[in-house]
């Protein structure tokens, strides 16, 4: 799945400066699982934005929504079709694919990314995700014992263990 992490509140607020009515849109799939952009995180960020703007004396209207998969146009239109006309800008809490899907669909609105998309990975244990794939476009895991050297070798070596190995296995 796609792993992402939220940008700082300061960076997000800088992107949104000048807008008075925004829609914060989460994604119910990958970024929900990695706790970056699901319903809970949409609620937290929206509250932070409202609080910070009212402290500054700038009333910001923040609407909230979550699309099951933000990278699927049909789902985005079904969930957001009636919400988008009423806002000036959209803040996406999906990965980069979600942000771009919405930018294509809602050309007339500025779309801002609230997350940094970091890698393709898997959950190792609670709160820890491991990078597993660099989306190289030519998977050769059949020749590497099911371990991806593109992202899991510290040196990115494709041709077997280097001099730092211990009894043929990587020390990592
Ligand atoms: S937009 Fe698509 S790929 Fe990105 S987090 Fe959501 S479901 Fe995953
Ligand atoms: S070789 Fe590694 S980076 Fe390339 S597709 Fe396979 S898992 Fe992903």
Image (cartoon, rainbow, N blue to C red):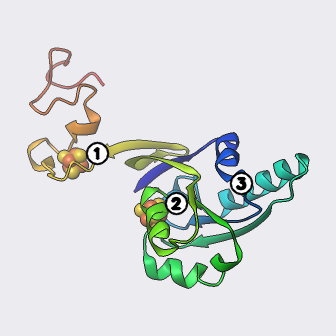
Of the numbered discs 1 and 2, the one sitting upstream in the chain is 2
Residue 170: x and y in percent read 22, 25
| Residue pointed to by mark 2 | 94
- Residue at 45% in and 82% down: 74
The alpha-carbon separation of the residues under discs 1 and 2 comes to 19 Å
Of the numbered discs 3 and 2, the one sitting upstream in the chain is 3
Residue 37 lies left or right of residue 9; in this view the side is: left
Which type of secondary structure does the marked residue at label 1 adopt? loop
Task: Give the foreground label among 1 and 2.
Answer: 2
Residue 105 lies left or right of residue 147; in this view the side is: right
For label 2, being within 8 Å of ligand 1 is answered yes
Location of residue 28 (image quadrant)? bottom right
Residue 139: x and y in percent read 16, 51
The alpha-carbon separation of the residues under discs 3 and 2 comes to 13 Å
The alpha-carbon separation of the residues under discs 3 and 1 comes to 29 Å
| Residue pointed to by mark 3 | 45
Which type of secondary structure does the marked residue at label 3 adopt? helix
- Measured along the vertical axis of the image, is residue 58 above or below residue 109? above
Which type of secondary structure does the marked residue at label 2 adopt? loop
Residue 127: x and y in percent read 55, 44
């Amino acid at each position: 799945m796609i792993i992402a992490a939220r940008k700082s509140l300061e960076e997000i607020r800088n992107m949104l400066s000048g807008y008075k009515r925004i829609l914060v849109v989460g994604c119910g799939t990958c970024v929900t699982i990695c706790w970056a952009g699901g319903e809970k995180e949409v609620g937290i960020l929206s509250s932070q934005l409202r609080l910070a703007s009212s402290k500054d004396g700038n009333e910001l209207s923040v609407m909230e929504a979550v699309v099951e998969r933000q990278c699927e146009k049909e789902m985005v239109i079904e969930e957001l079709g009636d919400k988008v006309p009423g806002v000036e800008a959209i803040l996406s809490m999906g990965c980069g694919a979600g942000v771009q899907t919405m930018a294509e669909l809602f050309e007339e609105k500025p779309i801002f990314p609230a997350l940094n998309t970091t890698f393709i990975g898997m959950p190792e244990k609670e709160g820890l995700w491991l990078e597993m794939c660099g989306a190289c476009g030519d998977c050769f895991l059949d020749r590497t014992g099911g371990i991806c050297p593109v992202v899991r070798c510290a040196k990115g070596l494709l041709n077997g263990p280097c001099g730092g190995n211990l009894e043929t296995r990587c020390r990592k």
